[in-house]
Amino acid sequence: MPFHGALLLLYNLTRFCMMHPYRLLILLAWAAFGGLSTTQAQPARPALRQAPAPLFRDPIYDGAADPVLIWNREEQAWWMLYTARRANQDGPGVSYCFGTDIGIASSADEGQTWTYRGSLDLEFERGRNTFWAPDVVYHNGTYHLFVAYLPGVRSEWGGVAHIVQYTSPNLWDWTYKGPLHLSSDNVIDATLMQMPDQQWHIWYKDQGNGSITMTATSPDLEHWQVADGPAIGGGSHEGPKAFRFQGWYWMLTDEWKGMRVYRSKDAKTWEKQGLILDGPSDRPEDTPSGAHGDVVVLGDRAYVFYFTHPGRKTHFEGERNADNVYPYTKRRSSIQVAPLTLENGTLVSDRSRPFDFWLSDPTRP
């Protein structure tokens, strides 16, 4: 500002204060309380957002299992799809695990509360049939659902299963596309991921080949080429989950005593590492171990979602009564969430300690 301009401003300000002394007092008081501060107060960091434990229990059947999460672009909310085991219904053997729908729970408050919304209408054949272990991806404006399907209801483990595909514009209305032709006629537990070359990979449990993880690739989510040999062999396992985090590809598999961790540079050759969720935590319902789940990666944060049998001492614990029925406390299951962190080159999950949990909008930077 030129010198004469500064003198004129000072003269006018002095004259104003002499003519209106009460306004000068107001101005001084305002400045004393920060009204003239050039530094704006920064908002306080939010308090630790603790995850509910359990995160969710199905209010209809109380048997939520095998969760998978997807951002619903229409509702601007997180959706959880899961196997809705009929845990509160007495029946012979393991019949409560058959005749199951895919349940829906949604959260519009970053995962702090979940509301049961019903179940997906997926029936394409007559009768009462079985749907297990969904996985869903969003691609070119369409949701693609891959889910295990078994015709009918059984009271013992068995039957022939296929992974079938549906598409939807909104996660509610699904069009049946048919079964995937994979490495055998008895496959379940799909997990999908798109690679940097735009090829889609699917990994799944092949019950017709020793219950190991097999894989196939596709350029368009319609035509699949099965890879030679297993992706992960060795002992039986289920529920593979593939994802990318902190510069590595990862796979979790359910060994029925926690989840096995595998690491890879290219999602083809997998290095076997340790177990996570292999014991109970201090949280309610988070026992005896974590089973078949999903992983959500949001920038530098990752969370593993899984189910537990809080009425059991081990994953398979439970005896049938004289009527061949498992007790309700042994049947029911709960959904939990835990943090995933990278330590010394592997994934660990400490869910007994408080951790910050929030599911932000994945479509925003």
Image (cartoon, rainbow, N blue to C red):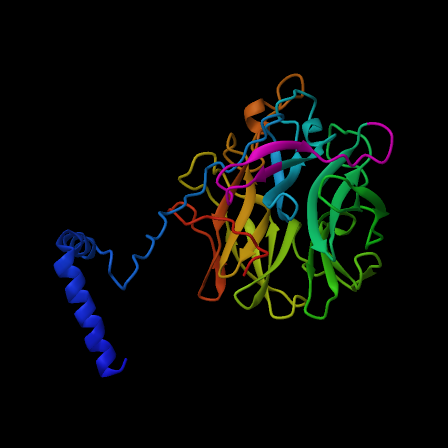
The image quadrant where one finds the N terminus is bottom left
Q: Give the x, y percent position of residue 197.
A: 72, 70
Which residue is more in the foreground, 306 or 298?
298
**Where 165 sits versus 99, above or below?**
below
Q: Main secondary structure of the magenta part?
A: loop
Q: Nearer the viewer, residue 97 or 224?
A: 224
| Percent position of residue 251, x then y | 61, 58
At 64% across and 17% down in the image, what residue appears? 322
Residue 324 located left or right of residue 313: right
Task: Specify start and end residues of the magenta stretch as a single range.
Answer: 105-127
User: Is residue 6 inside the magenta stretch?
Assistant: no
Give percent across and percent down for residue 344: 44, 66
Task: Work out whether 114 lies above or below 261.
Answer: above
Q: Nearer the viewer, residue 202 or 46?
A: 46
Q: Identify the image quadrant of the C terminus.
A: bottom right
Location of residue 305 in the rendering, given as x and y in whole percent from the top left corner: 55, 46
Q: Residue 42, can we see it?
A: yes
Q: Say whether residue 256 is visible.
A: no
Query: Dividing the picture into quarters, in which one does residue 173 lie?
Result: top right
Residue depicted at x 82% and y 59%: 224
Q: Is residue 124 left or right of residue 7?
A: right
Q: Is residue 217 above or below residue 74?
A: below
Residue at image position (85%, 47%) is 177
